[in-house]
Image (tube, helix red, strand yellow):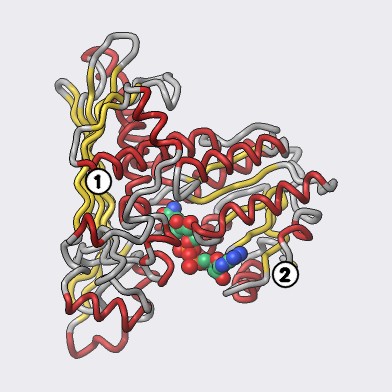
Amino acid sequence: MNRKKPLRIGYVGSGFIAQFLTVALTQVRDVELTAIYDRGGAEKLAEYAKKNGLGEPVLYSTVKEMCNHCDAIAIYSPNYTRLAVMEEIADAVKEGAPLKGVICEKPLGRTLAEAQRMADLAKEANLLTAYFENQLHMNVINNALHQLRPQQRAMGPFTLARSTEEHAGPHNSWFWDPVRQGGGVLSDMGCHSIAVGRYILTPEDKDLLFLEPVSVQCDTSLLKWGQPKYQKVLMDTYGVDYSKAPAEDFATGIITYKNPETGQLVKSQFTDSWMYDKQGMRLSMDALGPGYAMEVNTLISPVEIFVGDEAASSVADAETALEKSTATRGLLAVQPNEADLYGYTTETRDMVNSFLNGKDAFLNFDYGVQVTYLVQAAYMAAEKGVTLDLTDQKVQEELKSYRSLIAQGKGAEVLY
Ligand SMILES: NC(=O)c1ccc[n+]([C@@H]2O[C@H](COP(=O)([O-])OP(=O)(O)OC[C@H]3O[C@@H](n4cnc5c(N)ncnc54)[C@H](O)[C@@H]3O)[C@@H](O)[C@H]2O)c1
């Protein structure tokens, strides 16, 4: 069999998600990690890549230089650095770098304008794009959808999808700063839940954007981290002041979509929190159609371990047992292959195959813009305390330049 020439990728950002996606990379063929931007954890990541046969990554001190040594650049740096990195990539291509594609982790932008600019820059530079939204690539979701297609054909599509992502709070200070991150948990994780809800509701063989958003309701609240005791924890741990510039640690809402062929209305409910004090991160999705249903809960694993008090010191590494693990003793959930469970492996494989075949990935930057649109609409609905009419052209226009009060650092006005 003829193997393809591998896709050479370079990372900008070598923190939490870059490490996770590198574990995924070990489960994908035809790809090499050849370059890493030299900052925060780059050396450790390069060592891991070498040990695991992923390539011999070279560390570079400029993004521009990296573009001359890769086929695709992956933007895994914090949200507030996105645009500057993308601008550097676009400039490098203009100056002749032979780059073919660009990958960007969620969210594509902190605002709709930022996300649109990312997509425009990629287009101007003639780059293939991959928007990394792992939940649409989860095998558990796609398998359930595949199994239920015959029932859908017979009975009609799903009418309600509920999607939830919750954990006890992010691992780095910039996530907690609403200005640098773009908001709180709705910006950080609502993008996943909103995207996967719409995806589950989308009928078989229809475009990802087939369902038309009609309206959105949303509530953003500060349930745990606004209490003085926890404000102090945030100040001491991350240097952020939640008494002055808080972000929401809980968000929930409903988006109503219309099927443009039948006129049927369907609903997607999303819930996201940073105050889920249980074993670790939980993704849960369920959906109901007429006479059939599906349900996913990532805390249910075929593996569990027990560590009693006496033996507690022997826990090897709680974070390799489960993302955002909060405990090291008791009855613990362990996931044997989280990179695969959460969809990182499948999304990476899709990107590699798509780019090698000269195509955008399954989810491209234009799709990322649409997710940002719905996330920002949810902020606007919560801020105004209304059900936002997404068919209203005035609302659509307003969203183009909208930045939520929370993202402006004025969260105290809406959360206290
Ligand atoms: N898909 C998911 O479930 C998921 C999970 C976590 C994070 N993410 C996304 O991935 C991105 C990175 O998150 P993370 O958790 O890895 O963050 P992190 O803070 O753990 O790591 C960020 C990395 O970027 C580097 N960096 C910082 N400033 C930079 C700059 N100006 N230029 C280049 N590199 C810079 C840091 O040194 C570090 O290596 C975020 O956009 C986040 O939303 C996605």
Splitting the image into 4 quarters, where does residue 264 fall?
top left
Q: Which one is in front, 309 or 21?
A: 21
With 415 as the anchor, is 372 left or right in this view? right
Q: Residue at x 52, y 57 (%)?
A: 21
Q: Residue at x 32, y 53 (%)?
A: 405
With 280 as the anchor, is 374 left or right in this view? right
Counting residues from the start of the chain, the first of labels 2 and 1 encountered is 2
Q: Residue at x 61, y 53 (%)?
A: 74
With 72 as the anchor, is 345 left or right in this view? left
In this orientation, does residue 340 appear?
Answer: yes
Picture disc at residue 226: none
- Check disc 1 and report its element: helix, strand or loop: helix
Q: Position of residue 339 (x, y in %)?
A: 45, 56
Q: Position of residue 181 (x, y in %)?
A: 42, 59
User: Which amino acid does the dot numbered 1 rest on?
Assistant: Glu
- Check disc 2 and report its element: helix, strand or loop: strand
Q: Position of residue 275 (x, y in %)?
A: 21, 64
**Mark 2 crowd level (few <14, some 14–19, many ≥20, 10 Å Cα):** some
Q: Nearer the viewer, mark 2 or mark 1?
A: 1
Quadrant of image for the C terminus: bottom left
User: Which amino acid does the dot numbered 2 rest on?
Assistant: Leu
Q: Is mark 2 within 8 Å of ligand 1?
A: no
Cα separation, mark 2 vs mark 1, equals 44 Å
In this orientation, does residue 14 appear?
Answer: no
Q: Residue at x 18, y 83 (%)?
A: 308
Name the residue beneath numbered marker 2.
Answer: 59
Q: Which one is in front, 21 or 222?
A: 222
Name the residue beneath numbered marker 1.
Answer: 383
